[in-house]
Image (cartoon, rainbow, N blue to C red):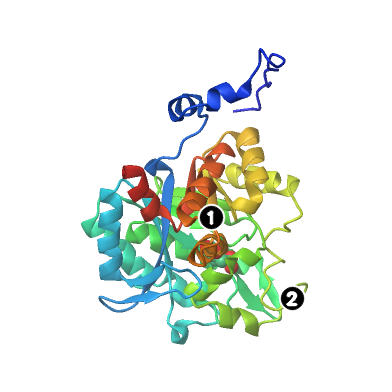
Amino acid sequence: MPARPVFTPAAFPAGRLRRTRRTAQIRALARENSLSVNDLIWPVFVVEGSNRREPVASMPGVERLSIDLITKASKDAAARGIPAICLFPYTDPALKTAACEEAWSADNLSNRAIRAIKDSVPDIAIMTDIALDPYNLHGHDGIVEDGCILNDETIDALVKMALAQAEAGADILGPSDMMDGRIGAIRSALEQQGHKDVAILSYAAKYASAFYGPFRDAVGATQALQTSAIAGAAKGDKSTYQMDPANSDEALRLVARDLSEGADMVMVKPGMPYLDICRRVKDTFGVPTYAYQVSGEYAMITGAAERGWIDGEKAMMESLIAFKRAGCNGILTYFAPRVADLLQG
Ligand code: PBG
């Protein structure tokens, strides 16, 4: 919805804006936005094994779960009305290579999880991540050669990865790699291979952010990332492909480009520091727009709440309504199950 003109209120005392804030009931009537369970996509971390749960130290309350437990958690999430989960695998370091072949193995951890969930939880949408970082000896989202991230070679790998995920039954593919041309390549491969109804939620405006730190611990990519020096960026830094936090118009170019190549939905990431981008994207394109409230945002809220510095529950809900106010249709958030519980009351 494009920005509307703002009505100029009557001058005081005819105009007293506190009248619509006086009671809980009047505030409810005057409320402009609301958060519902339909707005939630729950990112989860998958680990090998059975009946295994491993806490992620930098994300209090978040655990890596083995496939059997993820399946159970998906069932619970579906029962609470959460529409989608998003899978992130913790890959055995022994499987990481420079060519990242494990990324498109039909039986990799992520694809086995997709099949298991599809088999027993029909009423939750499964979203995936398309990027090479969990499988890459170098920890980067793209193929690294001679200190460079190779764009076109990476696309070939991402297409294979996307097809393997679609084959396993994924409903929504989430390319998070920030290579140029990947949406078009993935979309045409999906069409050719008979996966014409698989949706693409493009991480279109993804910034090179310090807020991804806890996530990289959760998927075990931190160490690998520190090993490779990329020309044009500091060690462990993804600035040659992820966006400069100083930029805003560039986000609109990226969204326009990804939509033109066949993305169905677009994402801004991280979330809270980039609400201005969410609003511009929604106003400019009017397409299904999502924000990823990333690991570092979750860690800030839960970490401060654990110390008693803020009210964690209130901060959680306030942070999420902010995304709705900024124009988002939904939010990827590690808080999803807690929010769903709270909303159910
Ligand atoms: C990897 C990927 C990242 C996240 C989602 N997919 C990390 C990165 O780009 O380094 C971050 C999510 C989070 O921080 O919660 N392609």
Q: Is residue 193 left or right of residue 307?
A: left
Residue topped by disc 2: 234
The quarter holding residue 345 reads: top left
Q: Are marks 1 and 2 in contact (CB under 8 Å)?
A: no
Q: Where is ligand 1, by quadrant?
A: bottom right
Q: Which of 333 and 116 lies nearest the eye of the viewer?
A: 333
For label 2, being within 8 Å of ligand 1 is answered no
Residue topped by disc 1: 293
Q: Which of 166 and 35 lies nearest the eye of the viewer?
A: 35
Residue 231 horizontal/vertical position (percent): 76, 76
| Mark 1: amino acid | Gln
Residue 38 horizontal/vertical position (percent): 39, 41
Q: Which of 296 and 142 lies nearest the eye of the viewer?
A: 296
Q: CA distance from mark 1 to mark 2?
A: 25 Å
Q: Which residue corresponds to the image point at 67% horizontal and 18% vertical from the top-left?
A: 7
| Mark 2: amino acid | Ala
